[in-house]
Amino acid sequence: MSTTPSCYHCGSAVPDRAPWHIVIEDTSHPLCCPGCEAVAHAIVDGGLESYYRYRTELPERPDERQAAKADTWSVYDDPGLQAQFVHPEGDNGHVRATLAIEGITCAACAWLIEHRLNALEGVTSSAVNLTHHRLRVSWDPGMVKLSQIFAELAAIGYDAQPYEPDQAQARLQHEERMNVRRLIVAAVGMMQVMMFSIPIYVSGPGELSEDFFALFHWLSFALATPVVFFSALPFFRNALRDLKTGVLGMDVPVSLAIGGAYLASSYAVLFNVGDVYFDSVAMFTFFLLFGRYVEGRARRRSGHSGNALSGVLPVSATRLEADGSERILPASELSPGDRVLIKPGHGVPADGIIEDGESSLDESMLTGEYLPVTRRVGEHVVGGSQNMENPLTVRVTHAGSSARVASIVDLTDRAFASRPRLAQMAARMAHLFVLRLLVVTACVTVAWWFIDPSRMLWVLLSVLVVTCPCALALATPTALTAGHGQLRQRGVLITRADAIESLSHVTRVIFDKTGTLTQGQMQLTQTCPLTDQSSEHLRAIAAALEAHSEHPIARAFRPFRDATLQARQVKSYTGSGLEGTLNGAIWRLGRPDFAASNPPTPPSTGQWLLLSENSAPRAWFKLHDGIREDAAQTVAAMQARGLEVELLSGDTQEAVGSLAEQLNISTWHAGKSPEGKLERLRELQARGERVVMIGDGINDVPVLAGADVAIAMNGATDLARTRADAVLLSPRLMRIFEAIEIASATRRIMRQNMIWSVCYNFSALPLAAMGLVPPWLAAIGMSISSLVVVGNALRLTRWRTSAAPQVVPATPVTV
């Protein structure tokens, strides 16, 4: 007769075909749920497997709330549900998801979550966005299930669920309301306790009777109790979680100080023995809560635009049916190819191309530019922008999670997957500092036991409080958050966190030409046939070839498309041109030396493309591309800052030289293939230069990948954006110069915060150990140190660029 196996950890019945188990001494033992599996693995991995050998009774389930959620976690393994929030990660079968995490309070929480998840077999990476309380995790679904990731998070004290902007914002608002309530209770308790403590401090011997002493002490006890058990509750909860996981965070010394002072004071009141520290308890709790509240408000304010992007797409859309009727439906149901009507005052529900109408659109949420821009037939519109004037008919190209605004949110989360060197160093220092602080505190306590036992307790409290590494833990996250927010407001999206530190060290800026220093809006201005074929027919052939390209040049030929001409087997030769078959002949369009073996001389100066049939020249096409209006000002500002500016392009000598002369760029290279550009980049890096590369096309991808910092323009291809360290959402080039200055300011403030926090802790520790700092002063000092760090970081939110050189606009030329 078969029997139902029992859970090796808690003794409960194990469901049939349950996948959970633990291996101890080469023996596999069944477990009943993911919660038991997570706790059992934590015990064994911590070297405590003897616990199971010597225990005298079975424990309770790890958490009844976790057990109740076991079925919910299993639901997240359903492919249909995962399709809503789990996305592919590369070509290796890995996937990624963004989760909203509850219970995060500081950088130590982020470190703990990442440390535990990265230890799971099958999890390739995890990164916590401390600003928005989001977790981006990537894993191999063949090795680990999503339910196991949820269970692991719950086992270390953090609730998680798929990130949904509205729900996440509601949770943050609820958390903020609770923090305000705790702060109010602590403030009222502190003021009242101080009111009863001051007469005891200022009265002389015999001025207060024993009855008044007892009354004031009992009133202080009653007022301090809700402060400890309500206002300080998050500190105790987080400290207990840290002790369970074996990772000491800053809440451990905080809880020891508050709990120790409260218990000692309560004992003194109940048994009329010793001193009372209720005023220090209430004051410390209030100042610590106030510091964290200000820090939290600063982080949320700096990251507000990032959260706002998540909900910028309108909920509904008006789709035009085949019979011309209008149908209102959820915007999430749109698909590429749909035609939508966007009325004045309505939001654009998806990315697309205007088929009918002309109007001004507000794109400030995406680009940081507050002036509306005019969009016409054939131009792209971005989902999330607002239609200001006239109705538009738009053909959808990207909708839902594939829209550009969704990719911006994803790239923002990716920025937190790595941290600058200074941030990593600060996180390690804060983690190690707590353990050393507890060791030092124990030594100081023993020393004062022999020096003066009556002062031992408050010296112990002062040491724990005054050296709490809150400022050290906040030093880099607050500066990074403020820096990211300032860059985001100016239309610069950092996609890799270490780009901020790299930008602050750059020595040379390299620009591509087409679509970077120029507007990328090519226009065909002249056609010169070399045969008896008509200009219209030759332009249509060129347009048939360019129909297969995403290069800005292709836009110049779009108006000349002929539906009866279809090019076949079209190949793109990066940096050279296009080749395809049409009517049995091989046609080439591009650089003269690519299109024909013996190309003729172009009719005049400027940018010319040669069209050939079976290597025989057939037509010249002259293109015009205007220079960006702030290109000269941007180049001058960078040169005034001491940066070397270089132009690196695959275009002709005449076009590149003309542009370089107009923009006063002394170092320029023309006719460079992608390999040639990368070779030039390697040459500069070998000389010790730190290079920023700015480009927008597929041909720029190799050099973007090799640069110290890669910046993709606002109109860049998807491939260029994914390879870039930063994406320019605004069409203004000056934003790049501002990004370099903001990055330098962010790194400078991170260093200032690090120096301040380290100097504060090392100077305050000996003073507190010598008994020169009372607990109430320690609470004020610790809070002030944290507020100094936060306030210094908030200076970035009011950052203004230095005055850029005034450049007299040159006469426009064809490039």
Image (cartoon, grey):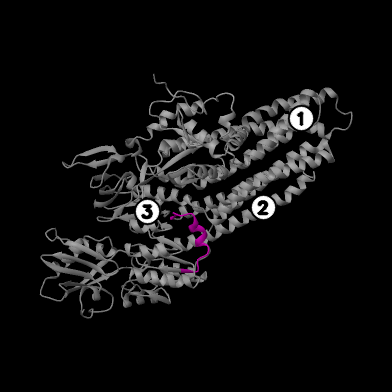
Which of the two labelled residues, at mark 2 and mark 1, occupies the earlier sequence position? 1
Residue 497 percent coordinates (x, y) = 49, 54
Using the image as rendered, state which of residue 33 and residue 361 is in the foreground. Answer: 33
Residue 132 in the image: state x and y as whole percent: 49, 43
Q: Amino acid at mark 3?
A: Pro
> Disc count in the image?
3
Numbered disc in front, either 3 or 1: 1
Which residue position is annotated with label 1?
A: 196
Residue 628, image x, y percentages: 37, 66
On the image, the x and y values in percent for residue 68 come to: 45, 26
* CA distance separating discs 2 and 3: 47 Å
- The residue indicated by pointer 3 is 372
Assess disc 1: are there few (<14), some (14-19) or many (≥20) residues with their C-alpha within 10 Å of its C-alpha: some
Instruction: Check disc 2 and report its element: helix, strand or loop.
Output: helix
- Asked if the residues shown at circle 3 and circle 1 are in contact, with their CB atoms under 8 angstroms apart, the answer is no
Q: Residue at x 56, y 58 (%)?
A: 747
Quick one: label 2 or label 3, which is nearer the N terminus?
3
Residue 441 in magenta stretch: no
